[in-house]
Amino acid sequence: MMRVGLGIDVHAFAAPEDGRRLVLGGVEIPSDRGLLGHSDADVLAHAVTDALLGAAGLEDIGHYFPDTDERYRDADSIGLLREVRALVGESWEVSNVDSVVVCERPKIRDHREAMRANLAAALGVDEPRVGVRGTTTERLGFVGRGEGVAAQAVCLLERR
């Protein structure tokens, strides 16, 4: 048996004076602005987490890690992904994950391999099973105006 899940996440940029770090796929990327969020606001890790949850037929990320719970303030989203992988259980194998980060800036090209490594480690799979790509919106919409970052991910699970 195989199951597919889709995850999407969006976060707005914080003001530079807020001092937020920009974290994507567990990698801190040099930037004058980070993303707003209760956790570290890692849109890529959140999209992958929701894709994994969806493939397993479980609730969304907010159900397990609500933004009203202070335990998750500034939480490491790669750590949350590890928790969800454990929740999904060993009866499901992660066949692959593919993801896209949508932003005008920063360019993620130089950070993709580290992102893949972090996501693969959290999922307990080899790096070739995890794809990370970047794209822009050609300056259209909130992403194009530099107001935030979005990510999408798909996950394929196979019953062991």
Image: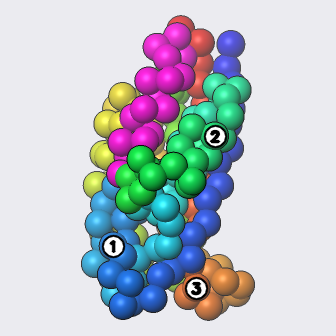
The spot of residue 85 in percent (x, y) is 46, 29
First of labels 1, 3 by sequence position:
1
Task: Give me the C-alpha separation between circle 2 and circle 1.
Answer: 25 Å
* Element class at badge 3: loop
The spot of residue 3 in percent (x, y) is 69, 25
Numbered circles on residues, count: 3
Left or right relative to 32: residue 68: right
Start-end of magenta stretch: 76-92
The residue pinned by badge 3 equals 147
The residue pinned by badge 1 equals 21
* Element class at badge 2: helix
Task: Give me the C-alpha separation between circle 2 and circle 3.
Answer: 26 Å
Of badges 2 and 1, the one in the foreground is: 2
Q: Is residue 124 above or below residue 121?
A: above
Image quadrant in which the N terminus is located: top right
Residue 63 bears which disc, if any? 2
Of badges 2 and 3, the one in the foreground is: 2
Q: Main secondary structure of the magenta part?
A: helix
The spot of residue 80 in percent (x, y) is 43, 41
Whether residues under marks 1 and 3 lie with C-beta atoms below 8 angstroms apart, the answer is: no
Residue at point 61%, 59% (across, down): 9
